[in-house]
Image: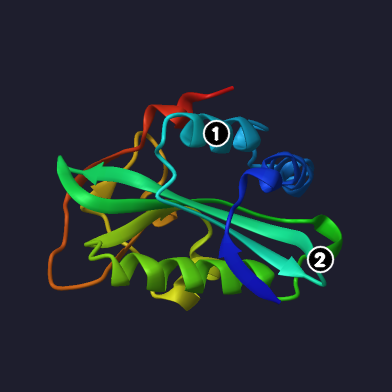
Amino acid sequence: MNIRPEQPADIDTIRALTRAAFANAPYSSQTEAAIVDALRDAGALTLSLVAEDNGEVVGHVAFSPVTVGGDAGWYGLGPVSVWPESQSRGIGQSLIRHGLETLRQIGAKGCVLIGDPAYYSRFGFVADPTVSYGDIPPEYVQRLAFGQHMARGEIVYHAGFGAS
């Protein structure tokens, strides 16, 4: 498997695989593909990585800038998408690990996400009651600091997350 930055030729595949990956997810708003497109159109995809297997795109992860309590230098992880038939093979994990390492290398303060603590704890994410996002239960609002700086407050995602 090869992980690389998205290329213009990948955009339609990313859109289709994101739709397919979230099609049956009970927590999904079914707007994930539109969010990725909106972030890309706004130039707000700091990292947009694809996983290739035998030359075919099988997964995608997006990272975009956020503020936490007005503090910049943080990034939001998501969405993460893998073709349904390729899930549970470690593709999403590889994409996330690669993206987090890249964020560290570019000097990010850390990363936040809204997601399943049982899944994301393997990457070092922790629920932090001092970090919030609307009325989302605090156990699903998670952060991973890359240094000693711990942001506190409300996460503000890019306006692209309002896409539908």
Secondary structure beneath label 1:
helix
Judge by depth and name the residue closer to the eye, 5 or 134: 5
Q: Is residue 125 in view?
A: no
- Residue lying farthest top? 164
* Residue visible at 47% across and 35% down in the picture: 39
Q: Are marks 1 and 2 in contact (CB under 8 Å)?
A: no
Image location (x, y in percent) of residue 142: 37, 58
Quadrant of res 149: bottom left
Image location (x, y in percent) of residue 73: 21, 53
- Residue lying farthest right? 85
Q: Which residue is mark 2?
A: 86
Judge by depth and name the residue closer to the eye, 119 or 105: 105
Quadrant of res 159: top left
**Can you say whether 152 is above or below 39 in the image?**
below
The amino acid at mark 2 is Ser
* Residue visible at 53% across and 24% down in the picture: 163
Is residue 138 shown left or right of residue 92? left
Image location (x, y in percent) of residue 100: 41, 68
Q: Quadrant of the C terminus?
A: top right
Which circle's residue, 1 or 2, is located before the other in the chain?
Answer: 1
Judge by depth and name the residue closer to the eye, 45 or 159: 45
**Can you say whether 31 is above or below 120 in the image?**
above
Q: State the CA–CA distance, disc 1 to disc 2.
A: 22 Å
* Residue visible at 71% across and 77% down in the picture: 1
Crowd band around label 1 with a 10 angstrom C-alpha radius: few (<14), some (14–19), many (20+): many
Judge by depth and name the residue closer to the eye, 57 or 151: 57
Crowd band around label 2 with a 10 angstrom C-alpha radius: few (<14), some (14–19), many (20+): some
**Res 35 label:** 1
Is residue 11 shown left or right of residue 100? right
Q: Is residue 10 in view?
A: yes
**Can you say whether 111 is above or below 104 in the image?**
above
